[in-house]
Image: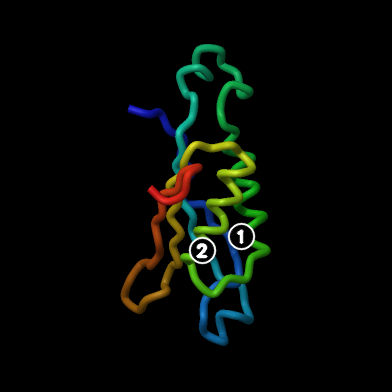
Amino acid sequence: MVDKIFIHGLKIPCIIGTLPRERKKKQRIVIDLEFPAPVRKAARRDALRDTVNYQKIAGRATAFVSKSRFYLLETLAECLTRVLLREFKLRNITLRVSKPNAIRNAKSAGVIIFRGKNGPS
């Protein structure tokens, strides 16, 4: 079993969608991330330098998404995943992007992807 760090419910406003009204005003999306981390080593030494700094990952994800202007959640997910894998030297990542109220009578709609250093798994 691999230890993981997760970030759930990261709410970020951005331009996303294909409809003309969606291209004019930022709307909130919700991101969930999960990635392997050296939890045992960090716990043993109680040192941030021995683990993945999830505050920095959340900050980078927020900065990237808030400046983005994608039409599709799929594109946003792929691009954000590439950025996080590269900048934080993660082995792999599971990323869920949800768009609340995208479908009438549904809480949200979205996409979940799993990517590793060598592409899709």
- Earlier in the chain: of badge 2 and badge 1, it is 2
Residue at image mark 1: 65
Q: Disc 2 vs disc 1: Cβ atoms closer than 8 Å?
A: yes
Instruction: State which quadrant residue 28 falls in.
Output: bottom right
Relative to 58, say whether 42 is above or below: above
Determine crowd level at label 2: few under 14, some 14-19, many 20+ residues with C-alpha closer than 10 A. Answer: many
Relative to 10, say whether 109 is above or below: below
Q: Amino acid at mark 2?
A: Ile
Determine crowd level at label 1: few under 14, some 14-19, many 20+ residues with C-alpha closer than 10 A. Answer: many
Task: Tell me: 2 left or right of 119.
Answer: left
Rendered image coloring scheme = rainbow
Q: Amino acid at mark 1?
A: Val
Instruction: Indicate the quadrant containing the N terminus: top left, top right, bottom left or bottom right.
Output: top left
* SS type, badge 2: strand
Residue at image mark 2: 29
Q: Outermost residue, front direction?
A: 118
Residue in view at x 51 percent, y 81 percent: 18
x, y (%) of residue 89?
Answer: 58, 37
Q: Count up the numbered dots.
A: 2
x, y (%) of residue 93?
Answer: 46, 44
Instruction: State which quadrant residue 64 falls in.
Output: bottom right
Q: Outermost residue, bottom direction?
A: 20
Whether residue 33 is visible: no
* SS type, badge 1: helix
Whether residue 78 is visible: yes
Residue in view at x 58 percent, y 46 percent: 84
x, y (%) of residue 83?
Answer: 61, 50
Residue 120 marker: none
Residue in view at x 60 percent, y 18 percent: 47
Q: Nearer the viewer, residue 92 or 95?
A: 92
